[in-house]
Structures are given as C-alpha cells and as structure tokens.
C-alpha cells in the first residue's frame, strides 16, 4: 500500500537473477529506464485521506477556445439565371486564445470553396462543374468544389450557361493550417 508522504524504496535481493554472487562484498549495479508503478488507493476528500491528496488537474488543451473557419452565403447576393450564377458571402476564424503569434498568423481563412449541386436519391448528387455541366451522380459526401475569389468577403461568379433546375450551394472555408469548416447550411436557388 502506497500513500501520500510515503517514499518508495527499491531493494534488489541477492538471490534475484542475475544478481546472484558468491561473495557478500560490496558492489554496485547500474539501472536505466526504470519504471515503478505504485497504486494509490486514497480518494481525495474521503475521511482519513491526507489533504495533500488532491484530484488531478484537468488536461490543459492549448486549442481550447479555438475556432474553426466559418463562412456563410449572403442570400440577397445570390443571383442565378440561364446565363450564369453569382454567389457572395463572408468568412472568418476566431484564433486560439493561447496560440503563439506564429500560430495566430496561420489561423486565418485563406480559401473559400463552394459546391453547387442537385440532390438525387440514395445520398447521391450531381455537382455543377466549372464548364457549366453537371457531374455524373456521385456521393454527396464527395463534393466538387469551385474556388471563390476573396476570403473575408468572397464572391463566386460563373458566366456560363447553367442547366435549368433547383440547386443547393454550400461553402467550405479553409485556413492556413488546412483546417476545414464544419458542414455549412445549404442555400437553395433555382435556375429557370
């Protein structure tokens, strides 16, 4: 039983292999990479437990209070027609509270991507490509993304013929550490 204020002492007995010696003369043993695990049974605050026994401090997370990139689409700035589509919005990121100056410089949005798509059945989607055509049906979790211009205020202009129909658009902001934002809400629009 090991408790607070106890001092652990390690004793190597003469009969323990490989320390068996025929002589009782003094000798020294070098020990490296020694690990001693001592179970402690005292519960902090329990009767009879010394006050020095306290609960371990919570793990310090240097990224606590950190934000991830965020972005949103301005619905009023969304214009779509058969001749093209214009989407605009904002993006940003809250830097980590305890980050170094060098880390804070990297905690900023450097790219904003958009995916414009039609939904199908069974979790499949067709994404709008840069040439105005729709992709083959593919998993909605594997979007085709188009790069917007700007970061804190961004715009995507596609001056290309677009097939008629109902579309959804989502943004994906990425910072200099390559962290992506959480899945954003989709904005719906129609091309008539």
Image (cartoon, helix red, strand yellow):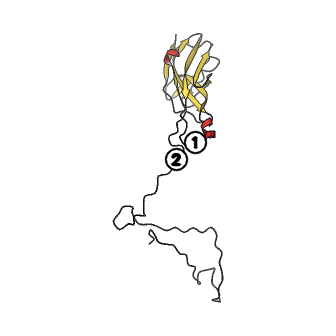
Query: Considering only vertical position in the picture, is 155 above or below 13?
Result: above
Residue at the left extreme, as displayed: 47
Instruction: Write down the residue under mark 1.
Output: 99
Please state the horizontal and vertical placement of residue 163, each as a whole percent of the image. 57, 14
The image quadrant where one finds the N terminus is: bottom left
Residue sitting at 33 percent across and 65 percent down? 47
Query: Considering only vertical position in the picture, is 96 above or below 53?
Result: above
- The disc at residue 61 is 2
Residue sitting at 57 percent across and 82 percent down? 13
Q: Are marks 2 and 1 in contact (CB under 8 Å)?
A: no
Q: Is residue 175 visible?
A: yes
Residue at the bottom extreme, as displayed: 23
Characterize the local packing of mark 2: few (<14), some (14-19) or many (20 or more) Cα atoms within 10 angstroms: few
Please state the horizontal and vertical placement of residue 74, each as a whole percent of the image. 51, 19
Observer-nearest residue: 126 or 37? Answer: 37
Viewer-nearest of discs 2 and 1:
1
Q: Secondary structure at mark 1?
A: loop
Query: Considering only vertical position in the picture, is 17 above or below 190?
Result: below
Please state the horizontal and vertical placement of residue 174, each as a whole percent of the image. 59, 32
Q: Secondary structure at mark 2?
A: loop
Please state the horizontal and vertical placement of residue 24, each as a whole percent of the image. 63, 89
Residue sitting at 46 percent across and 54 percent down? 57
Residue 101 picture quarter: top right
Observer-nearest residue: 175 or 113? Answer: 175
Residue sitting at 61 percent across and 16 percent down? 157
Q: Is residue 144 visible?
A: no
Total of numbered circles in the picture?
A: 2
Characterize the local packing of mark 1: few (<14), some (14-19) or many (20 or more) Cα atoms within 10 angstroms: some
> Which mark is first along the chain, 1 or 2?
2
Residue 91 picture quarter: top right
The span from disc 2 to disc 1 (Cα, nearest Å) is 11 Å
């Amino acid at each position: 039983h090991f408790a607070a204020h106890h001092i652990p002492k390690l004793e190597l007995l003469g009969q323990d292999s490989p320390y068996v010696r025929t002589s009782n003369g003094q000798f020294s043993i070098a020990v490296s990479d020694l690990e001693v695990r001592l179970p402690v049974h005292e519960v902090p605050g329990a009767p009879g437990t010394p006050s020095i026994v306290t609960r371990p401090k919570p793990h310090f997370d240097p990224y606590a209070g950190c934000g991830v990139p965020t972005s949103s689409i301005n619905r009023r700035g969304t214009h779509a027609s058969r001749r093209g589509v214009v989407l605009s919005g904002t993006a940003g990121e809250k830097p980590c509270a305890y980050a170094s100056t060098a880390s804070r410089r990297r905690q900023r949005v450097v790219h904003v991507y958009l995916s414009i798509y039609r939904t199908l059945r069974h979790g499949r989607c067709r994404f709008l490509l840069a040439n105005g055509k729709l992709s083959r049906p593919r998993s909605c979790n594997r979007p085709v993304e188009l790069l917007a211009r700007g970061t804190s205020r961004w715009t995507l202009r596609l001056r290309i013929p677009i097939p008629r129909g109902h579309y959804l658009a989502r943004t994906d902001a990425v910072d200099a550490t390559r962290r992506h934002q959480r899945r954003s809400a989709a904005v719906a629009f129609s091309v008539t």
